Image: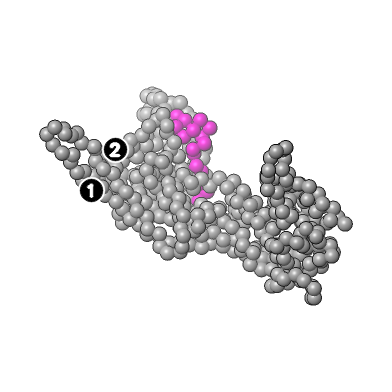
Amino acid sequence: METRRYHSLLGDMGGAKHSGEVEVGLDVMEKCQAALTKLFIPEYDSRGVGAFRGLREAYVTLTGDSDIRGFINLKNLSPDLRSCQDFDSSSFSTALGNTMNMYLSKKYKEFPYHEEVLISEKKKATDLRKVHSEQVGYFGELPDVDTETEDYSTLAPYADTEAQYEIGKKGAVVWVTDSVIINDNIGLIQGMVDRMSRSARVAHAKYVWNFYINNATCPDGTAWFTIGHGNLGTNALDISPLVTAITALANMTEPDPSNEKIGLDLATFNWSLVAPIALWDLAVKKNQQDSYFSANDLTTKEPNPCQKLFGDRNERIITCPFLTDANDWGVIRDREDVPIVEMSYLSGREVPEFISVWGPTSKKIGPGAPVPVFKNDKLGFKVRHEYGGTLVDYRGAYKAIIV
């Protein structure tokens, strides 16, 4: 009776909302999916469909199995649900997987590892073959031309660089047992998805940050941070070394044949200061202090040119938890200024996904033997994330390695 009551309520929702407005309503399966998603994510726009009151109610509604025996109970199902063409024994696990996917996506984006400051371009990979990264060089200055006496000249060919990389796979399997449904333990599933989203985000963040941490190889065959590139320092974090780092990045020149300085614009300064957790307080002090002494005798006081350059509230000071050296620090340019790291995601999926991999072996529902909802009293969901990337230019960052 409770299942039929709930489906009766679902049937009243999702239609036209205003006089004269025509809107295609949700079918019963879509309403059940919306109700389950709203149970996990209260702010989800369910188009007027209320949330299930619990995980157990969602299960019973989609299976009719009010005793949680693990089998579809056709007699206890809504007629509208039975008539849906896409309804079968995996409908509950599919709806749960879809909901977990949305919850995973929401949580994945909340972790502040800030690897996005290094990603200047994201691409969609359509297959698992090697990805070719091509970076277009720069023309030189546009020359003067006197069309009365000469033709337009041809600019020197612009240089370009190329790198190759592969799309890698990361993933694992998590389980939802029938006891979770029996105990109506939505909190356990939410906690599991929370932890899985963190695990996936840590893996992605480490992958990107490792280009910086491990001094990755550039397309020119040399390490990212070198004396030759002009982006390697050895002095501890302080005002003067910060000025040196910013100046070094501003003096970087565009690739041949341009060789123009990239420069910096203080009015739109959007660079980041990267420091290990051990230096977070020092980084904040250097960003906030209004002056400093330029001599050891503490007699010559200078205004701090870096004051609040990294944010009024230090919002562009990144305390990267993956930095293993307690004293190394660096400055990263705005990713819009110059290319830094290119990332590609299979089919454009930038966040991980849940895929059902363990469940009922037969989806057909009809007279005869009971149709199971679980396989060995549990459902399995594979979490998968597929991506790869490469460092494309050294000009985007400066690093001080303190020996």
Where 381 falls versus 234 (above or below)? below
Identity of the amino acid at label 1? Pro
Name the spot of residue 101 as percent of width and height, x first.
Answer: 63, 55
Where 296 falls versus 325 (above or below)? above
**What's the colour scheme?**
one colour
Magenta stretch encompasses residue 393: no
- Alpha-carbon span between mark 1 and mark 2: 19 Å
Q: Residue at x 72, y 71 (%)?
A: 364
Q: Secondary structure at mark 2?
A: loop
* Residue tagged 1: 157
Name the spot of residue 159 as percent of width and height, x first.
Answer: 26, 49
Residue 87 figure quarter: bottom right
Q: Point out the frontmost of discs 1 and 2.
A: 1
Helix, strand or loop for the magenta stretch, by majority: loop
Mark 2 or mark 1, which is nearer the start of the sequence?
1
Q: Secondary structure at mark 1?
A: loop
Taking depth in this image into account, of 299 and 173 the one nearest to the observer is 173
Mark 2 crowdedness (10 Å alpha carbons): few <14, some 14-19, many ≥20: few
Relative horizontal placement of residue 190, taking residue 132 as reference (left or right): right
* Residue tagged 2: 261
Where 59 falls versus 212 (above or below)? below
